[in-house]
Amino acid sequence: MSAHTPDVKRGGAGHAELIRTLATTPETLEAMLLSASETALDRAEPGEWSARTVTAHLRDDEFMVMRLRLERMLVEDAPTLVPFDEGTWAANRWRGRDGVRDLIADLRMQRAASLHILARLTEEQWRRPGTQSEIGTFDIHWWVEHWVEHDVNHLDQVATALGITS
């Protein structure tokens, strides 16, 4: 793991630690983004996303994928979850709130809604299953561990795009 992200390994974190880690993402991201120029926010290596696009992805993925899957696993019996096409999203995403402060504010709002749900789950609910073709069957705890890893990977991607080194 990088110096910019927490060291949470799959299978080793408890529910409270996972929730705390997810809660830190908006602040970590904000610290990196607010010190960057507009040019730096949009700079990307060929085949990579810019820091702005990664941030928009985190915002949109929060409600379109992460929380939606969580909610489906809570209310449906072992739902089959559909893969998310990031390439199509990136090519067609809505750019109406792409200012860095809007992106951060929107991510904070979306993440707060997710954390509100996660903080209230019972032990039994953390074990509710879902299935996705390219992953297999997993429970909510595994999904939230994946969610944390997703954040960690994208925070590292933003740091790299902005040239932030540890």
Image (cartoon, rainbow, N blue to C red):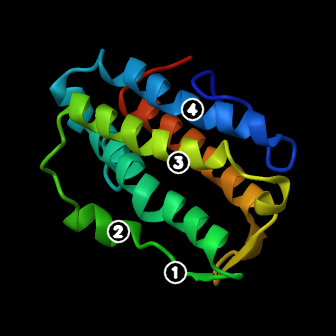
Real-space Cα separation, disc 1 to disc 4, in angstroms: 26 Å
Disc 4 target residue: 23
> Nearer the N terminus, badge 3 or badge 1?
1
Image spot of residue 33 (x, y percent): 33, 24
| Residue that label 2 marks | 87
Looking at the rendered structure, the secondary structure element under dot 3 is: helix
- In which quadrant is the N terminus drawn? top right
Number of numbered tags placed on the structure image: 4
* Callout 3–callout 1 Cβ contact below 8 Å: no
Disc 4 packing (10 Å; few <14; some 14–19; many ≥20): some
The Cα atoms of the two marked residues, 2 and 4, are separated by 27 Å
Tell me whether circle 2 and circle 4 mark residues in contact (CB < 8 Å): no
Query: What residue sits 42% from the left and 35% below the top?
Result: 158
Task: Report the residue at 40% width, 35% height from top.
Answer: 108
- Name the residue beneath numbered marker 3: 114
Q: Give amino acid for label 1.
A: Val
Tell which circle, 1 or 4, labels the residue nearer the N-terminal end: 4
Nearest to N terminus: mark 2 or mark 3: 2
Q: Which amino acid does label 2 sit on?
A: Gly
Residue type indicated by callout 4: Ala
